[in-house]
Structures are given as C-alpha cells and as structure tokens.
C-alpha cells in the first residue's frame, strides 16, 4: 500500500513539474514571422542600389562592345593579309616577309581576344561582388529594424516565412497573421525614402 501510494505521489509530482516546465517554455518563447523577400523587394534602397549596378553593367557592356568592334576590325585586317599571301607575283623574300607580318598580326589578335575575355570576366566578377555586398548591407538594415520591433513586442524569435528548405518546401508551414511583422518593418524602412521632385509643392 505504501509502495503504491509512493508511486502515485511521484507520478503527481512529475506531472506537476512537467506541466510547469511546458508552461514556462510557452511563456518564454514567442515567435513572429516576416516575409523577408517582400521587405527586401519593397525597400526603396534596393531599387536605388540596383539602378547603380544596372548603370555600371551598361557602361561595362559599352566598353566591351567597343573592344569587340576593334577585334572585328583586326580580324578583317588579318584575313586580308592572309589572302595577299596567295599572290603569285610575290617573290620568295616578299612572301617570307608577309608571312612574318601575318604571324605577328595573329599574335596581336590573340592577345586582344584574351584581353577582352579577361575584361569581361573581371567586370562580371566585380558586379557579382558588388551585388552580394549590396544585398548583405540591405539585409543587415532589415535585421536591425526587425530586432527593434521584435524586442518592443516581446518576441524572442522572428522566422522568415518566405524561406524554403533544401527540399523546396516552406520553412514556416503555418503562422498567425497577427504575429507577422512584414508590413510594419517595411513601413519603417521606407520612412527614410528620399522625397520625389515636387513633393509637397502646391
């Protein structure tokens, strides 16, 4: 009888502490959500920075087009030089001289090709690096605003509901709309947007 009573008391104690622990965890962890993609795309600074990158990309494209035009001209000149080698009236000495000129022209043409390819690769890498830098900076700004909002509302965690797992499945399967900070964060970020020309004029 005593053993049964003791087991009952231990069970009651365990249940009590388990429920208390669960209640403590529930009260300690409060989760909000945000659509990071929506905030990122809607932040005014993203468009501004992307316009700068687009202009730089267009400038690079213009330079590469000039290089390619020069390359085409050099290629056409090389072809004409090669064709002149078939002139039956050339003396052996003159033909040897022209063959050397063609060889020199071919080396110059190949070097120009390599220079253009190197310039293209360098421009592309620079743009990719700048894009990553821009994205990192914007994400950090968003995180700062999210942190302030979350702390003010007592949230301990904020999950990105636009994120997907490696299996292309949503990370956040369900969330309560009242706990979403997307619009609030986006509004706060866009308060710093520069005013358009003529704004406020009557």
Image (spheres, rainbow, N blue to C red):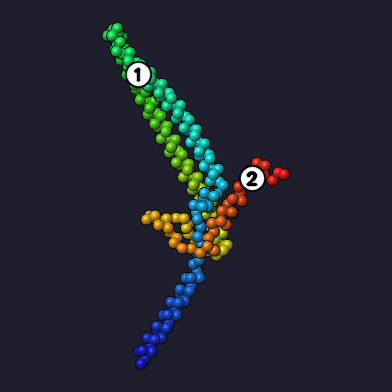
Q: Residue under circle 2?
A: 195
**Residue 88 appears at what percent x and percent y?**
28, 9
Using the image, tell me which numbered label, if any, was put on residue 123: none
**Residue 148 appears at what percent x and percent y?**
56, 58
Q: Are marks 2 and 1 in contact (CB under 8 Å)?
A: no
**Residue 109 appears at what percent x and percent y?**
37, 23
User: Which image quarter holds the C terminus?
Assistant: top right
What residue lies at 57% left-to-right and 57% top-to-bottom? 184
> Helix or strand or loop: what does disc 1 sit on?
helix
Task: Relative to 109, say whether 94 is above or below.
Answer: above
**Residue 2 appears at what percent x and percent y?**
36, 91
| Neighbours of disc 1 within 10 Å: few (<14), some (14-19), many (20+) | few
User: Which image quarter holds the N terminus?
Assistant: bottom left
> In the orientation shown, which residue stands out farthest toward the front?
202
Q: In the figure, residue 168 lies in which quadrant?
A: bottom left
Q: Upstream in the sequence, badge 2 or badge 1? A: 1
> In the orientation shown, which residue stands out farthest toward the left?
92
Q: In the figure, residue 126 lies in which quadrant?
A: top left
Q: Is residue 156 visible?
A: no
| Neighbours of disc 2 within 10 Å: few (<14), some (14-19), many (20+) | few
Q: Is residue 19 visible?
A: yes
> Helix or strand or loop: what does disc 2 sit on?
loop
What residue lies at 63% left-to-right and 43% top-to-bottom? 196
Using the image, tell me which numbered label, if any, was put on residue 79: 1
């Amino acid at each position: 009888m005593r053993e049964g009573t003791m087991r009952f008391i231990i069970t009651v104690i365990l249940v009590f502490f388990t429920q208390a622990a669960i209640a403590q965890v529930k009260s300690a962890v409060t989760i909000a959500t945000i659509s990071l993609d929506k905030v990122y795309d809607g932040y005014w600074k993203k468009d501004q920075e992307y316009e700068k990158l687009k202009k730089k990309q267009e400038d690079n494209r213009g330079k590469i087009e000039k290089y390619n035009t020069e390359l085409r001209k050099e290629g056409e000149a090389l072809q004409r030089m090669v064709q002149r080698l078939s002139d039956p009236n050339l003396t052996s000495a003159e033909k040897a001289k022209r063959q050397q000129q063609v060889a020199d022209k071919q080396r110059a043409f190949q070097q120009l090709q390599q220079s253009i390819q190197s310039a293209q690769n360098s421009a592309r890498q620079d743009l990719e690096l700048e894009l990553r830098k821009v994205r990192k900076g914007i994400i950090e700004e968003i995180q700062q605003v999210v942190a302030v909002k979350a702390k003010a509302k007592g949230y301990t965690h904020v999950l990105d509901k636009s994120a997907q797992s490696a299996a292309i499945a949503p990370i956040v399967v369900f969330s309560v709309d009242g706990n979403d900070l997307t619009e609030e964060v986006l509004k706060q970020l866009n308060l710093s947007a520069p005013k358009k020309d003529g704004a406020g004029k009557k």
